[in-house]
Image: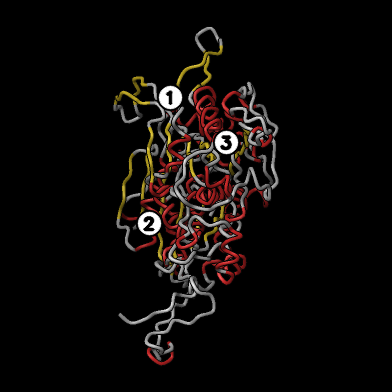
Amino acid sequence: MANQTMPRSAEAGSPLTINGRRPSEYNPLPHRLAEGENATPLEVVGASASDKLVIMMVGLPATGKTHIARRICRFISFFHDIPSQIFNVGDYRRNICGAKMPASFYDPKNEEALEQRTMACNAALSDLIDYMKQDGVRIGVFDATNSSRERRNHLCKALEEAGIGAKKMFLESICDDDKLLEENIRKVKVSTPDYKGEDPDKAVADFKERRAQYMSYYETLDSSDGSYIKIVNCRTFVVNAIRGYLPLKIVHFAMNLHTLQRTFYLTRHGQSEYNLLGKIGGDSGLSDAGLEYARRLGKFAEEEISGKLSEDEDGNKVKSSRPCRLWTSTMRRTKETAQFIKHDSFPFKFDNKEEVDWVQFRPHPWRNLDELYAGTCDGLTYKEIEQIYPEEFQCRQQDKLAYRYPRGESYMDVTLRLEPLAHEMERTREPVLIIGHQGILRILYAYFTGLTREEAPYVSIPLNHVIRLSPHAYGCEEKRICLMEKSEMLKDGQDEPVTSMPVKDEPTSTQYESTDPIMNAPSC
């Protein structure tokens, strides 16, 4: 067998030689990747899409159009690196006419108001066209009611005449579920600039009157509108004449969306044996401190996540169990962290009328959640990597996002395998507790909080913390809860068992520096 040197990553500075011949001799015309040595997956950099796309929203107010538009743009821009922008006609209308307009302003017989609303529509359309004329694949979303077929024909004609060369599709959201509609109005619409500072009940009444104005001339989509997806109550889907990679990708994603309130609880596994040694990767178990955190997490899951406060007939606050999910990676340290979480069962009926015997926090291990694989550096400390592979160490320092460990993964690779999990998180209606790893949770955290992919590798996800995320139409609420202080992890020389430490009644929210060597233990 011919003698070969190790690749760059294993023997820094040594070119690959075969039988003493250099690359220029045995391969004078090499295949060079445009993405460079790290060869980022094409799906993650938008290379799988070839056409521009304009999405035109359709639907009455309070049907979740803006929420759906924002989630689509966030998903496509974050996981596929395709520029995406929303052109919300309501924002243009507020700039032109002011925010607080009475319901009569939306009366189709109000000619003066109609002229102003048309002006706002044309201004948004003009900016959309300018945006779509730019080079490269991109998505533009025209977010408005687009209630009449006449208005939709006007949009299509304007796009054709502009010659932007983009595919077009409509996305209609219908909500005829009174309970869901009432929830959308009270939780979202009354907090918009149109009703800021207004009495909630008066705001709801005015908004319903505004909605009735649109209903008087609303026309739903049909085959004459061309390509479209119609979403009814976030449960029923009608797809017509959708073709192409990007439109189909969006249809698939949109079918996982809903407008209900949801909450995710992200936490790293408890301190592992490798954390204690400063090693990255591996598949070690928990340290004594890690086991104590697992116990506290079990109590937190039972008391803070699965419990739901509601009112009885007399108006008294009562606590009842609500269905919750538990996801871990397939690695030992995350499974051990979940070992003290209880799995009670109770009858539960889904919104599709299916009745099941729900198992609370049923463990669901995902390979997608496994830590970023460090390849030949797995099990080393960062100091050892710097000494053994100095070139690799410097490459990672220069571009942490795209850098791929030799025979391992990069953050871009991880982003690709987390895309299906993002679909699941968007689809899920129950609270989800995710016990994962720092590198993985950084990507999920960045996606839901609006950070860029470039910022993701530097997000602080400290040990012993639960990060509660509550995404909504206009952002994401966040709360960090510390279940175990750093001082409780350090031995005092008396070898007192960690498990003898009392669990605090009220979790604290202490913040630790991102450089803290204990709470931000080494991770890939």
Q: Work out how far the residue at label 2 is from the one at label 3, CA to CA, in angstroms.
A: 32 Å
124 up-or-down from 176: above or below: below
Front-lying residue, 19 or 27: 19
298 up-or-down from 44: above or below: above
Q: Amino acid at mark 2?
A: Lys
Front-lying residue, 269 or 7: 7
* Residue located farthest toward the top when viewing the structure as drawn: 314
Looking at the rendered structure, which numbered label has been put on residue 466? 3
Q: Of marks 2 and 1, which one's residue comes earlier in the chain? A: 2
The residue beneath circle 2 is 249
| Labels in figure, total | 3
Q: Residue at x 55, y 37 (%)?
A: 470
The residue beneath circle 1 is 342
Q: Of marks 3 and 1, which one's residue comes earlier in the chain? A: 1
Q: Secondary structure at mark 2?
A: helix
Image coords of residue 113 (percent x, y): 61, 47
